[in-house]
Image (tube, rainbow, N blue to C red):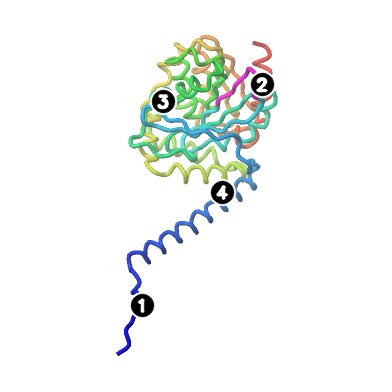
Amino acid sequence: MPSDDSVSPDPAAAADAVRDRVDEIVDEATDALDRAVDEATGVPTDDGDIEEFTHDGSTLIAERRGDLASPRTFVLVHGIGMGRKVFADLVKHLQDGAVVIAVDLPGYGEAPEPPRTPAIERMADLVAAYVAHLGRGPVVLLGHSMGTQVVTEVAVRHPDTVDRLVLVAPTVDRRRRRPWSQLWRLGVDLFGESGKVLLLGAREYLRAGPHLRRKMHAMLVHRPEDAYPRVRAATLVIRGEWDVVVPQEWFEEVAAAIPDATAYVVAGHHHETLIRTAQPAADELHRWLADG
């Protein structure tokens, strides 16, 4: 009887090979979709200088562009559900004559999900540690939406890291802290927004999906109104004229609470004013910096 020297395939190894191939296909499809979204929304498809920074168990991703010879540094911090790529248009308007760094906070964008969802104060400590790590001195620190809560805490807890502070669409209105109120207002605000805002925002929210409920809780329990009077940096507070998430009365209260604040309203814009087109806010930011 002839001998059979053939080796029977290992089912476990075959299954592993199939899973690896499926993972490769998913990664390739995800990368292609990301490129398509970037191209459709005007986000540069070439990355700037990317850095991963870890402090106290949480990691952020930072993307740097601009003029390293310039003494001025902007650090941009996004809102809930977002990531550094929502600042693409703003970066274009700031990077000439400055270093501009946009970050993904832990569990957002491309930053890994931390073991525990950090409080706003812990994220502020992380951002402050990163600014100190840069070694470029105090920065112009800009936050959008939830990012305004983070940068406000940076300015209060680590004042030596902040030269100027910029709060765009500051949350959370102290009269409207319930999650369903926030979600309803955001939905109303997005009605009629541009396709660019909706497409880019949807992509970033999907990335931030894990533990989004816990992230919303961390945002809502924070009380920025307690921190505003302790801000010592000169501050520019910006609101879109049609922003439903940040009512005019709350915007005025924020500006009045900060000792050295300048208020500016972007005509015809909603909550996501920096995504739709950042030029009006960037122009005002440049004027404000020049006057100071």
Residue 175: which numbered mark, if any?
Answer: 3
Count every numbered label the image shows and give the total: 4
- Residue 34 bears which disc, if any? 4
From this view, report whether residue 34 is shown above or below residue 259.
Answer: below
Which of the marked residues, 3 or 1, is nearer the chain's N terminus? 1
Identify which residue is drawn at 39% across, 23% down.
121
Mark 2–mark 4 distance (CA, rounded to whole Å): 32 Å
Callout 4: 10 Å neighbours few (<14), some, many (20+)? some
Magenta span covers which residues?
Answer: 68-75
Label 3 vs label 1, nearer the camera: 1
Q: Earlier in the sequence, mark 4 or mark 3?
A: 4
| Sooner in the amino-acid sequence: mark 2 or mark 1 | 1
- Kindly state the secondary structure of the residue where label 3 is placed: loop
Question: For the residue marked with disc 2, what is the amino acid?
Answer: Ala
Labelled disc at residue 69: 2
Q: Nearer the viewer, mark 1 or mark 4?
A: 1
Q: Residue furthest left?
A: 1
Please name the residue that numbered disc 1 is placed on. Answer: 6
| Contact? badges 4 and 3 (CB < 8 Å) | no
The kind of secondary structure element at disc 4 is helix
Which image quarter: residue 184?
A: top left
Q: Which quadrant of the figure contains the N terminus? A: bottom left
